[in-house]
Image: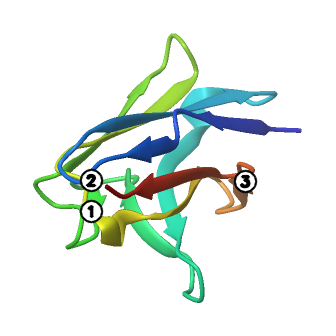
């Protein structure tokens, strides 16, 4: 059974940066498409950034130019580098891993990101 463990969240001032990490275990990492989602209070969970099986990385409009998703296959880890953070970026950020073969989704437990002065 796959396990996804996020880390790196916290409190940051507007304009600051954070890097989230998602460590994956229990499943062969190359079988997965990795992504990041977020959910703000009172709102639905939304895509932030995700790798696709083919084609360019999918970024939410709100993330373009500020956030970068990456992965390290040797470490079975995905990352979300977030720059120029805004108060609107405050949310719980969830790591997502989708099995390429079936589309089945695994989720992490979430990590809180709060952008506030």
Disc 3 to disc 1, C-alpha distance: 19 Å
Residue holding disc 2: 57
Disc 2 to disc 1, C-alpha distance: 6 Å
Disc 2, disc 1: CB below 8 Å?
Answer: yes
Residue 61: % across, % down: 20, 73
State the residue at coordinates (49%, 52%): 113
Q: Residue furthest left?
A: 65
Residue 86 occupies quadrant:
bottom left
Q: Is residue 59 above or below residue 16?
A: below
Label 2 element class: loop
Q: How is the image coloured?
A: rainbow
Q: Residue furthest top?
A: 74
Mark 3, residues whose alpha carbon is within 10 Å: few (<14), some, or many (≥20)? some
Disc 3 to disc 2, C-alpha distance: 19 Å
Q: Would residue 17 be found to the left or right of residue 100 on screen?
A: left
Residue 103: % across, % down: 64, 63
* Comes first in the chain, label 3 or label 1: 1
* Comes first in the chain, label 3 or label 2: 2
Residue holding disc 1: 59
Q: Is residue 98 visible?
A: yes
Q: Is residue 33 above or below residue 29?
A: below
Q: Which mark is residue 21?
A: none
Label 1 element class: strand
Residue holding disc 3: 106
Q: Is residue 100 visible?
A: no
Disc 3, disc 2: CB below 8 Å?
Answer: no
Is the N terminus in the top left, top right, bottom left or bottom right quadrant? top right
Q: Would residue 54 be found to the left or right of residue 56 on screen?
A: right
Near-viewer residue (90 or 44): 90
């Amino acid at each position: 059974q796959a396990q996804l463990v996020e880390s790196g969240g916290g409190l940051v001032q507007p304009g600051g940066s954070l890097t989230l990490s998602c460590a994956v275990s229990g499943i062969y990492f190359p079988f997965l498409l990795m992504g990041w989602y977020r959910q703000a209070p009172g709102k639905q969970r939304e895509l932030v950034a995700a790798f696709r099986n083919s084609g360019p990385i999918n970024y939410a409009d709100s993330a373009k130019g500020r956030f970068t998703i990456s992965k390290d296959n040797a470490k079975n880890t995905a990352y979300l580098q977030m720059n120029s953070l805004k108060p609107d970026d405050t949310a719980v950020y969830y790591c997502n891993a989708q099995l390429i073969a079936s589309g089945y989704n695994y989720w992490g437990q979430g990590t809180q990101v709060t952008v506030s002065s």
